[in-house]
Image: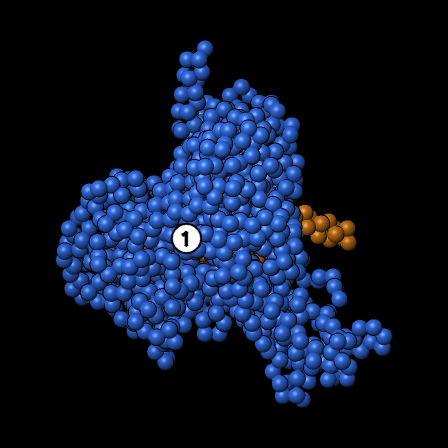
Chain colours: A blue, B orange
Amino acid sequence: MNLPRTVVGRNVWKVEGVTLVTGGPAFTDDIHLPGLLHGKILPSPYAHARIKRIDTRKAKALPGVHAVLTYKDVPRVPHTTAGQSWPEPSPYDTYLLDNKVRFVGDRVAAVAAESRAIAEKALRLIEVEYDVLPAVLDMEQAMAPGAAVIHDEPDSTGIHDAARNIAGYILREIGNVDEGFRESDFVFEREYRTQRQQHCSLEPHVTISWPDGDGRLVIRTSTQVPYHSRRQVAMILQIPVSRVHVIKPRMGGGFGGKQEMLLEDICGALALAARRPVKIEYTREEEFYMARTRHPQILRMKMGVKRDGTIVASQLTVVATTGAYGSHANTVQGNTGSKVLPLYRAEHMRFECHVVYTNTPVAGAFRGYGCPQGFFAQESLVDEIAHELGIDPVEFHRRNVIRLGDIDRLSAQLGEGKAGLPRHIRSCSLPECMDRGAAAIGWTSKRQALPAPARHLKRGVGMACTMQGSGIAGIDWASAFLKMNEDGSFFLQVGAADVGGGADTVLAQIAAETLGVSLDKIVITSGDTDTTPFDVGAYASSTTIISGGAVKKAAEKVREQVLRMAAKMLETPVENLTCGDNRVSTVGEGKKSATMTEIALHALYKEKTQIMDGASHFNTDSPPPFCATFAEVEVDTQTGMVRVLHMATAVDPGIAINPAQAEGQVEGAVAQGLGYALTEELVLDDAGRPVNPSFLDYKVFGAKDMPRLTTILVETDEPLGPYGAKSVAEVPINGPAPAIVNAIFHAIGVRFRKLPIRPEDLLRALREKEAADDQCV
Amino acid sequence: MEVRLNVNGKAKQWSVAPGDLLLDVLRREGYFGVKRGCESGECGACTVLIGGTPINSCLMFAAQAEGSDVLTIEGLSHGDELDPLQEAFLDHGAVQCGFCTPAMILNAKALLNRKPHPSEEEVREALAGTFCRCTGFRKPVEAVLAAASRAGRKAARREAAR
């Protein structure tokens, strides 16, 4: 029987919402621990150097200092900081502390002291003598003969070619691309460049660690990956996994930056050394260059098309830098191919990528995970091709995009650092997304000619189509556990890690819907390795579909138990019963019912049975959410400023479990995409030092900078998702940069192939265009 | 040294060091709704209202708050009754991670106290000092506008009942 849904699809309040709006203690640092010490890390001042001598005696002698650690004091265990399923597809090239530093900000030493001021003073008392080495800052020079070798240590593993600074190399082809280009009427090829973007979670990385009464190491931390962190910390500190307890409180944003075991190891090491609680909290400046960034890439995109606009072959050749360590090196870059090229139905596709080490801040996971770079190149080139062929970009997309029933074969070749699984498109509303996005922006009329409000102001509209995944096929998995209480409520325990996007609410909604109870009857605990079952964590747009799938399965099992218990109480066959409205009722005539409270009391005290069950879940496919992004811009040809007037984003998230939250994900992603397009770049000087590590100098879109936003959810029913849900949080970040670039071209006839588009670049390009136009005349 | 001030309507007397930031002292005293996002006056997460005016508590020494009336997010609701702004933020899905939410709500509170019926432009101006990486600001702006009209309706009802 298909009952109307009562909780799924509703805009309920966030389950932790009241705590958040009243300022309740919710986050990692919202706790007072007696005897808490402050940990600080001594960052390397050099991009590449060997530590010749390090003397910590003066620091240790400083009153109030309880621990000082250098590479001499800790186990040397090669590992990756990438929070990924074991065995991680990232190279093991990182050490808790090392005798070599590989970027400005790399760990030299760590201290724990009674106050932050004492800790900072202790850092200044550590004497370090460096043998400064030549630094490799440019990714194109990293592979050149004679370039300094960044990972010359013998014990790192999983590096593709350490002698040439190549962390990873990918080459995949379906069909025959060279043949495809020969078959094409036109072949286009362009180069694109993307920058170093930082996550800027408002809550910086923060970890508090202490040995508990039983000597187990407790780690309270702002992480997207509690279980991976537990496994990694245990390995690095050489203690059993069972001696580590990771707790993830509420998180103040992550965006991939916390899919990383970043502070947990060093904070744990300090806590064990000091035998006291230790907190390490990055300052905003440290967050910019000692945490993680998006991978900068140089992309060569080549496409062959027929005269009618059919794409025959596409090839993407990428050089990317992972910075000093290879965290997520292979997988982010793999995505740049596997999630981008298959948007089109071209028969021939080829993706090649070198991921190189440089002596720069470490790149890692960041919302979009390689797709913003790839789609910037692909959707810019597609716009250029459509223009050259005289086809409207929306029409060009319509002819070429992947559609319902298609199979993406590139994904079968290119998975998580190895071969993957083919993607079957079982749900897709991309054509309708394009229609509705175009209508919202006024595409048809504005593509003609836009009236300029003043001579020096030019307006244009542009668009882009993008997709993503929903979990990593065959790898991401999750579990959930439910038990019933006397008052008819249920404890829901999940290892999933709500980053702040509302996962706990969505998971509770799925449980409530399945059990036929109101949302207040679900009490969720998440992200605690002692009290909740395993989950890979919050990344790869997996939580709703994978963790949600586990919750639904567990809730179905528990509902079965509830129904059987009610059948005994009501003396009626289970088949006659249904859950809903916080009770179990008979269907049909002679209506009888028992409330959930009555059932729970009966089970616990009459039958002496705890109604409880758990379930695990994974998918062998990763259904893509789709997105059509439309931008309207106004270019000031006197100042070079680009003002975005309107962003219309239409997304296919499957079914939205909580539509308001889903819209919020879209809007936040668009804001970050706007920064990626126009303002955000962590700039390094010629010694590899960060130039702008502050919110004053690194410009993020604020309340007054944001354009008008139109958000459209074009729902589909995905067979592999709980209640038809796919994912929504990542896909909308991919479109803004190419849509804006294409809108700028529409406005002023200039193409930008490097991000961010700065006013000075725009003015220079306009001057060059004017000079070229004059030449033609 | 001792500092005497009013926090959320309650008289407090705290021992502080001359260099202690108001942010640190408030958090030390358990006002965890006051957040540390940058410690340099750029992100606004540490916003409190002093005499009704939004102030970055990371840019102020605790000693400077001597004799002040400080309102933190903890003082906005009355028991279980949320402020209309708090309710509107939840109704409109304007809370994501929630780290900047107290600051956004307090900035909005200061605005609505000054200007009960602001324009969207004025709301954006009021929120411009608060850095939010999650929402893209559409829903927070909507929430503030909705709270303003809700509060306006409540006031009108009170007026009519009189």
Location of the N terminus of chain A (image quadrant): bottom right
- The quadrant of the rendering that contains the C terminus of chain A is top left
Q: Which chain carries label 1?
A: A
Instruction: Give percent across and percent down for residue A111.
Output: 26, 63
> Vertical placement of A110 versus A305: above or below?
below
User: Where is residue A110 drawn, in percent x and y?
Assistant: 26, 61
- Residue ID at (50%, 72%): A532
Front in this rendered view, residue B59 or A206: A206
Q: Nearer the viewer, residue B154 or A277?
A: A277
Q: Where is residue A302 in the image (x, y as percent from the top left)?
A: 44, 35
Could you tell me the amino acid type at mark 1?
Answer: Thr
The residue at 65%/38% (across/down) is A435
Q: Is residue B74 above or below residue A401?
A: below
Query: Is disc 1 placed on a helix, strand or loop?
Result: helix
Closest to the observer, A584 or A219? A584
In the image, residue B144 above or below residue A590: above
- The residue pinned by badge 1 equals A331
Q: Can residue A776 be seen in this view?
A: yes
Asked whether residue A201 is in view, the answer is: no
